[in-house]
Image (cartoon, rainbow, N blue to C red):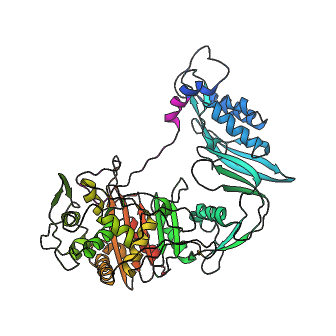
């Protein structure tokens, strides 16, 4: 729903856009590209899905042309000959892959799996390469020909739109990243860390003292993603890079996010700002844990409660009535279905029950203005100033100063407010310690970078926030997720409806001792249903 706000909210909005191409999209591509073919229209135009013989004949011709190193010819058997020609040419010319042998497997309808075996040769070095992929044969719209439905993954399963293959001397020397205990962090042991390790290598390869080797990589030309290494032809010298990652917390995070699709989690050490774990369960390789930008739902009430306390509007034991509905500038806000109203509620009670209407009604009190929440987020919690330097690309949160319905929506974590799990883990760390310590993965001493600063919270405000989070974990909406965790614990839940999705998104942030964590997942349910168990699993390790 964009940056607006809607009635009957549950705690936040997480807008997701996905794209892809497949059988349902090929007709548009075909119409624009003339089906990619060069042999003209068949005498009798066929329709419907390609038959078994057509699938076999088309794939055989495509594979034969690919094997003989004729990218233009191979591309003529696809429904996007321009894109196919470019990538298949790069396969030979830029990636230096030769001696290609393709072995098709048994077709499943119009989809054909296959194995590619070849050799990569560059700079006097050569190594064999082998991998599996698949393609689908479709009917060309204008010609009726059976054609390969062109996707970058036809060439290699790791390729996505705008990616290409390149073999050359590494742009960055390799690194041997180690955790806080000195143990080596690898993609094989911690698959979710793969994009993070690639990013650390790109930024710190030279600072770590390594020398480059020769590699075959996937080059991501869209965005700022670092190259993804596929094959090493000549080993470089790896430089040692110390990180703040806790192997035990990372192991727990990796396992926890696998429980729910499209999930991300971050854990930090509140006393230092060190990132203990970062994990994502996503098919696109995006580090949503650090770079995600989504409305955080009711986890935002930590910052809103701090604003109310700091501005003298109320305190944890003072009134914060929770009616069924609250109207702000003609926009009606509601609570979770089944929540009983409580006109005698305190701020602590409305916080631990996650009552939307209590917070909406209080934001109209003096001296609050359209900028109050923004100032609280920036000055106290260090958010929204685009100055975090974590060691890799990260989002710093956004709490814009707005009027109208979005001012009220922002107070409950929707409207134009945007956060990542990293931001919310930091918010919890600030809330329970009173001090903002910018999260980081690599010590700033390595490259003399200046970490972001913020004023932090008054001692009294931090004490109240910590106590309200404790109540939420032991008596409120986070009880089930936090059950069984010993020690000093606290939490805040959040959920977000997404237009067009049957399931809501789940947010959760919490602490246990000197570890704070936050997670979001598109799996659905209230904050404690999906994101809650992820956070609890990480907190259980103790860092």
Residue 522 image position (x, y, % from top left): 41, 57
Q: Residue at coordinates 52% horizontally, 76% vertically from top-left?
A: 274
Point out the residue furthest to the top here: 43
Say if 340 sits above or below 141 in the image: below
Say if 255 sits above or below 10 in the image: below
Residue 77 image position (x, y, % from top left): 66, 29
Q: Residue at coordinates 68% horizontally, 39% vertically from top-left?
A: 87
Q: What's the magenta region?
A: 1-29
- The answer to whether 276 appears left or right of 231 in the picture is left
Residue 490 in sight here: yes
Q: Nearer the viewer, residue 106 or 329?
A: 329
**The quadrant where residue 493 appears:** bottom left
Residue 81 image position (x, y, % from top left): 64, 30
**The quadrant where residue 411 appears:** bottom left
Residue 47 image position (x, y, % from top left): 53, 22
Say if 504 sits above or below 251 in the image: above
Instruction: Tell me the chief SS of the magenta region.
Output: loop
Residue 526 in sight here: no
Point out the residue furthest to the right here: 124
Q: Is residue 142 magenta?
A: no
- The answer to whether 145 appears left or right of 19 in the picture is right
Q: Residue at coordinates 27% horizontally, 58% vertically from top-left?
A: 407
Q: Residue at coordinates 15% horizontally, 70% vertically from top-left?
A: 321
- The answer to whether 315 appears left or right of 390 in the picture is left
């Amino acid at each position: 729903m964009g940056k607006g706000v809607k009635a009957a909210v549950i705690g936040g909005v997480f807008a997701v856009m996905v794209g892809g191409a497949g059988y349902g999209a090929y007709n548009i591509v075909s119409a624009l590209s003339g089906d990619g073919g060069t042999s003209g229209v068949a005498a009798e135009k066929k329709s419907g899905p390609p038959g078994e013989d057509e699938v076999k004949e088309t794939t055989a011709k495509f594979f034969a042309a690919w094997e003989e190193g004729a990218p233009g010819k191979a591309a003529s058997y696809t429904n996007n000959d321009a894109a196919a020609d470019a990538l298949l040419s790069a396969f030979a010319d830029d990636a230096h892959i030769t001696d290609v042998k393709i072995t098709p497997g048994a077709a499943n309808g119009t989809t054909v799996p296959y194995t590619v075996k070849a050799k990569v040769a560059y700079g006097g070095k050569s190594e064999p390469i082998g991998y599996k992929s698949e393609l689908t044969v479709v009917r060309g719209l204008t010609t009726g020909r059976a054609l390969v439905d062109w996707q970058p993954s036809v060439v290699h399963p790791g390729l996505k739109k705008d990616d290409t293959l390149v073999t050359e001397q590494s742009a960055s020397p390799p690194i041997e990243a180690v955790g806080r205990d000195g143990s080596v962090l690898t993609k094989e042991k911690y698959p979710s860390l793969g994009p993070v390790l690639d990013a650390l290598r790109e930024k710190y390869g030279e600072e770590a003292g390594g020398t480059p080797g020769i590699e075959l990589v996937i080059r991501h030309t869209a965005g700022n993603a670092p190259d993804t290494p596929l094959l090493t032809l000549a080993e470089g010298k790896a430089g040692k890079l110390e990180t703040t990652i806790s192997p035990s917390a990372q192991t727990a995070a990796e396992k926890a996010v696998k429980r729910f699709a499209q999930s991300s989690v971050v854990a930090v050490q509140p006393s230092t700002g060190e990132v203990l774990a970062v994990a994502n369960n996503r098919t696109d390789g995006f580090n949503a844990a650090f770079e995600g930008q989504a409305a955080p739902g009711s986890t935002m009430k930590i910052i809103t409660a701090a604003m109310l306390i700091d501005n003298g509007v109320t305190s944890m034991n003072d009134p914060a009535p929770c009616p069924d509905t609250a109207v702000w500038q003609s926009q009606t806000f509601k609570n979770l279905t089944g929540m009983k109203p409580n006109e005698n509620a305190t701020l602590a009670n409305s916080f631990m029950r996650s009552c939307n209407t209590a917070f909406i009604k209080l934001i109209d009190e003096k001296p609050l203005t359209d900028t109050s929440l923004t100032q609280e987020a920036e000055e106290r919690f260090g958010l929204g100033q685009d100055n975090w330097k974590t060691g890799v690309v990260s989002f710093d949160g956004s709490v814009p100063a707005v009027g109208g319905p979005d001012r009220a929506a922002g107070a409950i974590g929707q409207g134009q407010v945007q956060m990542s799990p990293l931001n919310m883990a930091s918010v919890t760390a600030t809330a329970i310690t009173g001090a903002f310590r910018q999260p980081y993965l690599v010590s700033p001493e390595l490259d003399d970078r200046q970490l972001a600063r913020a004023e932090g919270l008054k001692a009294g405000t931090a004490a109240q926030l910590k106590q309200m989070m404790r109540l939420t974990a032991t008596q409120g909406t986070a009880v089930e997720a936090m059950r069984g965790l010993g020690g000093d614990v606290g939490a805040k839940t959040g959920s977000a409806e997404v237009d067009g999705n049957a399931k809501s998104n789940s947010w959760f942030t919490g602490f246990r001792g000197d570890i704070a964590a936050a997670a979001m997942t598109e799996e659905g349910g209230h904050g404690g249903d999906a994101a809650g168990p992820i956070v609890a699993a990480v907190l259980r390790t103790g860092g």
